[in-house]
Image: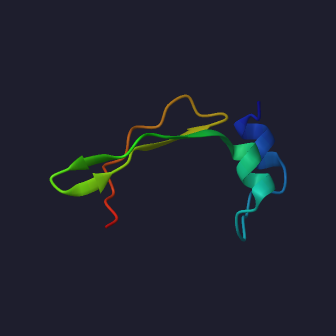
Amino acid sequence: MVTVEGFLSGNYTELPGLSATILNEFIDRILVYAPEKIDGKRIQKITIQYNFVVEIPEQKECVVA
């Protein structure tokens, strides 16, 4: 597991962009749930679990038509 100190002590204090390597070190897993239809709109929940963050509050839904 990567710690905050370890992550920031490397080359990641200034990020010109996100590479696959950086994302692999930063993100533990991405959970994609089954889509639902609510009021005629397709809603799909996605949860991103980070390596060294205990819990991040759930975001408000973002609907893309």
- Residue at (37, 48) in percent of width and height: 44
Above or below residue 58? Residue 55 is above
Judge whether 39 appears above or below 25 on screen: below
In the rendered view, tell whether residue 9 sits above or below residue 64: above
In the rendered view of the protein, which quadrant contains the C terminus?
Answer: bottom left
- Quadrant where the image shows the N terminus: top right
Drawn side of residue 48 relative to residue 58, left or right: right
Q: Is residue 2 left or right of residue 29?
A: right
Residue 57, horizontal then vertical, whole percent: 40, 37
State the residue at coordinates (25%, 49%).
Answer: 37
Between 3 and 58, the one nearer to me in the picture: 58
Q: Residue at x 70, y 38 (%)?
A: 4
Position in image of residue 30 (x %, y %): 58, 42
Q: Which of the 4 quarters of the picture holds residue 36?
A: top left
- Most distant residue in the left direction: 39
Count how many numbered circles sit on residues in the image.
Answer: 0
Residue farthest to the bottom?
16
Is 17 situated above or below 27? below
Model colouring? rainbow
Query: Is 23 displayed left or right of 47 in the figure?
Result: right
Q: Position of residue 64 (x, y in %)?
A: 34, 64
Front-most of residues 8 and 56: 56
Horizontal side, residue 55 vs residue 29: left or right = left
Q: Nearer the viewer, residue 15 or 59?
A: 59
Residue appearing at x 76%, y 35% in the figure: 2
Q: Nearer the viewer, residue 37 or 3?
A: 37
